[in-house]
């Protein structure tokens, strides 16, 4: 480093407050001028270190600290702004005052832009200008460095805050997204007319509803006056005390109301409403409750249908078991009263009348049991292709002659009604039952309407009914203008033995049997009723193009040809009466009390047995398990199943195993002979030895 070389009067300030100046200047006259100016300053404030080249300046900067640099832009080893760039790259925080011989404003401005704090024209320099420029450069650079450091600190804080805000924003955005999804669902539900929002001011007891809530309660938009008591009065009387108690408990326990209740709709119907809400506080006191009202009537209806189906299934199992035993009792009774006139042809008129009375009573009992079975399992009768309009016309002709003249009967039938596959007797029973119920509901007269139409049910409608599937249906409607059914009774009308009629005027099995018949046809029932306005029962039956063959009525009159028939039943009375009936009709008969005894008899007779009449429900070895064992002796053995319980799944299993027919107990002599005639007419008749 060159100190004071070629300098006659170096201005050396050794005080601790001296400003150290590095002067980069190769012109000796200008160097001496600057030295003189700085030497004569008050208190000799400056320590000056002069150098002639940029390389020497770099060495000085690396050797010691300087407060400011006076830089000539024309040097032996560097020219122009390159000198400035070199100094800045070496000491970026050092204040620089640029010295120039020319009054080139563009160069000076560019130097400041590239990092110099000031510039001076050499021929214009005087003590005041030089000292002021040095001090200005130092102060400006210090401020710039301080600002830069502050900016760095601020940037660090901003970056930290940005990260925090980003995390917070992400969490808030997630909450906003969640809220938006809830809002979207709420808006969709509100658009569907099933949901609306409310606010209850706990302090003033005022309630505000949106238009959607008003619609749920059957009110016009803006018609609810916000009175708490008016809302309570809209609730079902049976639910009001409970809801008021739950509201009080919600306030005391500091939480919202979450419950369900019924409301009285202006239309007269009862709707179910669910409430979900939150409680808000001001000053530590409960202030307001905000929440939503949701119409859950359809949900409740589906729940009721499901519970009713479960209840009916349980009752059906019980009723089916009782019916099975009763049928086993009634079967020999019917057979005996029909067989006695053949065994005793010279009976007098009085005894014949007694037998006819016994037969009629047995048939009535059988019909009652059949109703129970119809409810319990559904009965598979003889299915044929039906045009329901003809059946409706037949029913209308019957009821016109029996119903009071005060009841007007109207029909509204579709001219191109689809065909169905059904049992004429059972469906006739369904329609007559509904017409009789309609008559009883109109003691003062009214209108009974029979209607038929084609309907195609979609998936959405099918989901609203447990027994429905999408597809084409024939809908039969029976409606009246009578007393209607109260809401508390409507969900129980299909329960067996339930009736609102006086004692002795109804068994409570009519609608239960109706439901069983319709379900056995693959259909379902829809009921709508309003008190004092009437009821409408809609029967939906699957449309079908299948035509079932009818049984030849002449088969009953055909006598046997000594074919050997094996009767297998654990009821001795059933075996005995069936045996006597078949013997009287020129058949040969063997009887067995269970499956094991039947196997032994078939093993002994093998090809001689023409047909086996076998009960499906027997102890030890039932009919379903016995038939495959019998077929080992005779693979072509004709077998007809018998049962007091016509469960659809049991009948299906019997058909799958190879039973040629099915006789439901109690069956008549006619039923038995027709079944044998049908299945033996194409069978070779072996003669027993």
Image: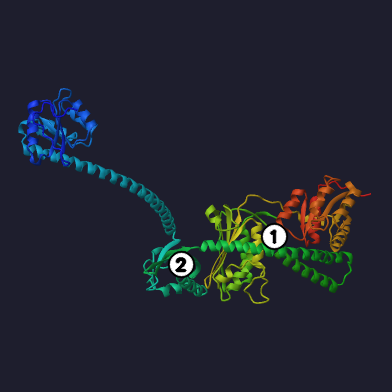
Mark 2 — residue? 255
Percent x, y of residue 541: 61, 56
Residue 96, above or below 484? above
Residue 514 at least partly seen: no
In-image side of 305 versus 138 (left or right): right
State the image quarter where residue 492 is shown: bottom right
* Residue 178 in the figure: left or right of residue 558: left
> SS for tag 2?
loop
What label sits on residue 27 in the rendered view?
none
Indicate which label's residue lies in the foreground, 2 or 1.
2
Asked whether 219 or 190 is in front, the reply is 190
Residues packed near mark 2 inside 10 Å, few (<14), some (14 to 19) or many (20 plus): some
**For residue 542, above or below residue 38:** below
Q: Quadrant of residue 587?
A: bottom right
Position of residue 419 measured from the top left corner of the image (x, y, whole percent): 61, 53
Residue 444, position in %: x, y?
Answer: 56, 76
Q: Residues within 10 Å of mark 1 (few under 14, many from 20)?
A: many
Evaluate if marks 2 and 1 touch, with contact meaning CB atoms under 8 Å apart.
Answer: no
The residue indicated by pointer 1 is 377
Write down the quadrant of residue 501 in the picture: bottom right
Q: Could you tell which of marks 2 and 1 lies nearer the N-terminus?
A: 2
Q: Residue lying farthest top? A: 76
Residue furthest out toward the right: 689
- Residue at image position (16%, 40%) is 138
Give the colouring mode of the picture: rainbow
Of 163 and 668, which appears nearest the observer? Answer: 163
């Amino acid at each position: 480093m060159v100190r004071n070389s070629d300098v006659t009067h170096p201005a050396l300030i050794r005080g601790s407050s001296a400003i150290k100046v590095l002067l980069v200047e190769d012109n000796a006259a200008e160097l001496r001028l600057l030295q003189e100016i700085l030497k004569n300053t008050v208190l000799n404030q400056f320590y000056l270190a002069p150098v002639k080249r940029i390389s020497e300046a770099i060495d000085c900067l690396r050797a010691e600290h300087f407060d400011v640099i006076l830089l000539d832009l024309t040097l032996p080893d560097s020219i122009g702004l390159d000198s400035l760039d070199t100094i800045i790259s070496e000491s970026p925080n050092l204040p620089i005052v640029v010295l120039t011989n020319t009054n080139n404003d563009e160069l000076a401005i560019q130097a400041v832009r590239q990092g110099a704090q000031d510039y001076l024209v050499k021929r214009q320099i005087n003590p005041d200008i030089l000292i002021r420029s040095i001090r200005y450069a130092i102060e400006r650079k210090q401020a710039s460095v301080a600002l830069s450091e502050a900016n760095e600190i601020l940037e660090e804080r901003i970056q930290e805050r940005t990260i925090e805000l980003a995390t917070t924003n992400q969490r808030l955005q997630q909450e906003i997204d969640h809220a938006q999804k809830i809002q979207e669902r709420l808006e969709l539900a509100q658009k569907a007319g099933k949901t609306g929002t409310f606010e209850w001011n706990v302090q003033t007891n005022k309630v505000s509803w949106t238009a959607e809530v008003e619609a749920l309660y059957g009110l016009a938009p803006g018609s609810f006056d916000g009175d708490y008591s008016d809302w309570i009065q809209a609730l079902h009387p049976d639910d009001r005390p409970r809801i008021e108690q739950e509201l009080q408990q919600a306030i005391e326990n500091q939480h919202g109301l979450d419950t369900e209740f019924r409301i009285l709709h202006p239309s007269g119907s009862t709707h179910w409403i669910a409430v979900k809400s939150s409680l808000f506080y001001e000053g530590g006191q409960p202030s307001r409750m905000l929440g939503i009202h949701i119409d859950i009537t359809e949900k409740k209806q589906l729940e009721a249908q499901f519970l009713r189906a479960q209840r009916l299934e349980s009752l059906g199992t019980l009723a089916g078991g009782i019916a099975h035993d009763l049928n086993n009792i009634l079967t020999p009774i019917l057979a005996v009263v029909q067989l006695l006139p053949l065994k005793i042809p010279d009976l007098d008129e009085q005894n014949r009348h007694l037998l006819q009375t016994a037969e009629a009573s047995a048939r009535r009992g059988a019909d009652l049991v059949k109703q129970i079975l119809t409810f319990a399992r559904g009965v598979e009768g003889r299915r044929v292709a039906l045009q329901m309009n003809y059946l409706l016309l037949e029913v209308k002709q019957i009821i016109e002659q029996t119903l009071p003249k005060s009841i007007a009967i109207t029909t509204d039938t579709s001219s191109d009604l689809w065909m169905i596959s059904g049992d004429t007797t059972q469906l006739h029973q369904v329609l007559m039952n509904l017409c009789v119920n309609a008559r009883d509901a109109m003691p003062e007269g009214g209108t009974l309407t029979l209607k038929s139409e084609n309907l195609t049910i979609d998936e959405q409608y099918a989901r609203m009914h447990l027994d429905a599937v999408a597809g084409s249906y024939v809908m039969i409607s029976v409606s009246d203008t009578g007393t209607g059914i109260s809401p508390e009774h409507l969900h129980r009308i299909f329960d067996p033995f339930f009736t609102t009629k006086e004692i002795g005027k109804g068994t409570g099995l009519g609608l239960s049997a109706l439901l069983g018949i319709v379900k056995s046809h693959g259909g379902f029932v829809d009921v709508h009723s309003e008190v004092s306005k009437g009821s409408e029962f809609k029967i939906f039956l699957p449309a079908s193009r299948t035509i079932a063959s009818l049984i030849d009525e002449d088969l009953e009159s055909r006598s046997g040809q000594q074919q050997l028939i094996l009767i297998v039943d654990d009821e001795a009375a059933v075996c005995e009466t069936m045996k006597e009936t078949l013997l009287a009709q020129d058949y040969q008969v063997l009887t067995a009390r269970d499956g094991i005894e039947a196997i032994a008899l078939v093993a002994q007779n093998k090809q001689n047995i023409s047909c086996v009449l076998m009960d499906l429900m027997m102890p030890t070895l039932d009919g379903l398990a016995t038939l495959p064992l019998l077929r080992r002796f005779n693979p072509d053995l004709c077998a007809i199943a018998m049962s007091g319980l016509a469960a659809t799944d049991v009948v299906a299993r019997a058909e799958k195993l190879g039973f040629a027919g099915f006789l439901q107990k109690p069956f008549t002599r006619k039923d038995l002979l027709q079944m044998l005639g049908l299945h033996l007419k194409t069978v070779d008749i072996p003669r027993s030895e």
